[in-house]
Image: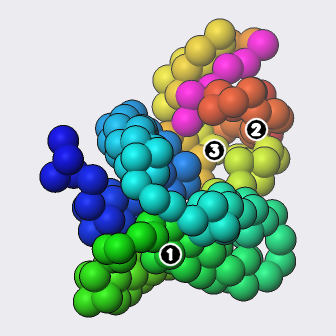
Amino acid sequence: MDSLLNPNIGYIALMASMLLTLMALLSPGTGVLEAGALVLLVFCGWLIYNLPTQLWALVLMLVGFVPLVLSTKRRWHYGYLIASIVCFLVGAAFIFKGESWVHPLLLLIVSALEGGAFWVVARKTLEAYLETPIQDLSRLIGTVGEARTDIYQEGAMFTNGELWSARSSSLIAKGKPVRVLDREGLILIVEEMKK
């Protein structure tokens, strides 16, 4: 176990845990990223406990989460994102102290790779998060289509180039023109159009 008490190993584990944590926070999913981040964070906690560390660097890394959260809420999200990356990279670079520091070449290479990956992943996730939806389902209300099946409590209609589940309060025969009155989730409430 003493061979793991190395600032270089600690630095690499810390950087990997930060990237996995970022990816898990920004795009939660299967739990694999979350589990990997948790395992690495526990290992990093053990290293921080057993190696000589600088408290200010740890605090700086924790403070880096504030601009990361602000980047999802504020107008100048890229500035907050850059501040977050700088806090994480500077804090990780100086967290371990003592006779043996992190090797400068390792520090330079991993910081460049981590900062670049952090920037790309976070920027793309923020762009997707802040993007207005392409499909506005409320625009379906009032559109006209055709009943593809008999529609009463359930059925299908075709409108705007798509097949939709539909429901009506009265029987509508297959092939009749229908108008969308409302929407409940992905089910359209329709009525038969009278000529």
Residue 65 or residue 122, whichever sits in front: 65
Residue 109 in the figure: left or right of residue 21: left
The residue depicted at 72 percent of the width and 77 percent of the height is 80
Location of mark 1 (residue): 94
Q: Which mark is residue 180?
A: 2
Placement of the N terminus among the 4 image quadrants:
top left
Q: Earlier in the sequence, mark 3 or mark 2?
A: 3
Residue located 65% across and 10% down the image: 153
Asked if the residue at tag 1 contacts the one at tag 2, i.e. Cβ–Cβ closer than 8 Å, the answer is no
The amino acid pointed to by label 2 is: Val
> Residue 181 — which label?
none
* Disc marking residue 145: 3
Q: Is residue 144 visible?
A: yes
**Viewer-nearest residue: 165 or 135:** 135
Q: Earlier in the sequence, mark 1 or mark 3?
A: 1
Question: Is the residue marked by circle 2 packed among few (<14), some (14-19), or many (20+) residues within 10 Å?
Answer: many
Dot placed on the residue nearer the N-terminal end, 2 or 1? 1
Question: Is mark 1 in CB contact (under 8 Å) with mark 3?
Answer: no
Q: Are marks 3 and 2 in contact (CB under 8 Å)?
A: yes
